[in-house]
Image (cartoon, rainbow, N blue to C red):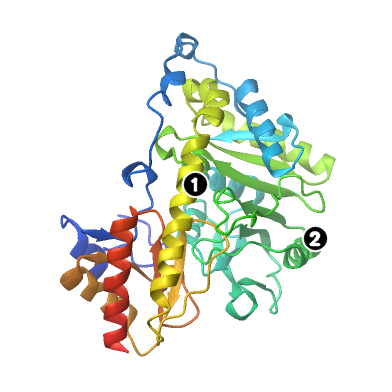
Amino acid sequence: MFSARFPGDLRPNAIARLRRGTPVPFDLTVSNPTICGIPFPETILEPLSRAEGLVYRPEPLGIESARRAIAADYERHGADVDPRRVAIVASSSEAYSFLFKLLCDPGDTVAVPTPSYPLFEHLAALDGVRAVPYRLDPDDGWQPSLRAGVPEVTRALIAVHPNNPTGSFLEPGPAASLARACARRGAALIVDEVFLDYPLAPGGAAPTFAPFSDTPTFTLGGLSKSLGLPQLKLSWIVVGGPDAAAEEALSRLEFIADNYLSVATPVQLALPSLLVEAQPVREAIRARCRENLGSLLAAAVSVPAVTVRPPQGGWSAPLRFPATIDEEALALDLLREDGVAVHPGYFFDFPGDGYAVVSLLPEPAVFAEGVSRLLRRIASGA
């Protein structure tokens, strides 16, 4: 009845089955900022109630005032973005779907980084596209490794800046290598910057790729991460690269978006206000993540079997421990006996065994106790 072309085993794994219906006191996998005790201004959603939102405005690439607000917001990153090169979508997943439709024919491939968030393969398959991995090198700060080159039929190469879950920013040298690889294959560069607003070291901000002009480039952002508002369902694509290629891409994106018209009018009208009103939320999330990362690094010092390479940005931190400890068994024991949830490294396709990933979003007391229990169990297993 159902197509067999979907990747992987879609049945619930042992960890998911164990978690189902069971409260986890120390959930170190949480990725929803609205349930982590982050303070939100009481008036933050008031712009959604404006009367003009009652009038439906079906603009395929987005309402002009919202596109201008997104372009102006890039000034925080020192980037000059043309509002006409902004396309508004409902989510990052929809952005990928639109871009796969734009760039690929069925059976084409897109190159995706590993380790990375386990979503690309499924999104690609839903559009009849194959995801092929390229490795991030742990010995080079998780920068891209293209020793094997890019497959000839690759239509796009995806980079995540900063990467989830390694937290590594894409550095200028490797970025130039990716651009050259794309140019040789006539491929586009897709740069996912949803976590760009969360550098984890003071003064550690990285530049955006939005004004990148060397090759056709599509830069992704959105409210879900940038302002901690996943429920409002608004993201965007900034189309970069040579003028002629960008104009053609925008024309084709407009045709694709016109067949969906998925972004609600009220949230687009509210966007200029939201980008201002929600800044304290972004700052609170950034402070939370930095506090929890400091707690993790301090706690890990006392456990020689654990290595934590400080991530540069984002909401996650990977831990390295001896590969003799089975990742899934560790995660299951933590759930059953310690009330702690973590992601085993194989969820993200880390190179080899001996990884776990924790979210930096939980409330500090919950995070500290969960990390303490995690480290004790690793130490006992080592």
Q: Earlier in the sequence, mark 2 or mark 1?
A: 1
Residue type at mark 2: give it: Ala
Residue 98 in view = no
In the rendered image, residue 234, in percent from the top left (x then y), is placed at: 50, 34
Label of residue 331 in the image: none
Secondary structure category for the residue under label 1: helix
Q: Quadrant of the N terminus?
A: bottom left
Residue 65 visible in this rendered orientation of the protein:
yes
Q: Is residue 75 above or below residue 310?
A: above
Could you tell me which residue is drawn at 56 percent across and 61 percent down?
163
Q: Quadrant of the C terminus?
A: bottom left
- Disc 1: which residue: 93
> Does 374 sit above or below residue 359?
below
* Residue 103 drawn above or below residue 157: above
From this view, report whether residue 214 is shown above or below residue 86.
below
Picture quarter containing residue 147?
bottom right
> Where's residue 23, x and y in %?
17, 56
User: Label 1 amino acid?
Assistant: Ser
- Real-space Cα separation, disc 2 to disc 1, in angstroms: 25 Å
Q: Which residue is mark 2?
A: 183
Q: Nearer the viewer, residue 299 or 30?
A: 299
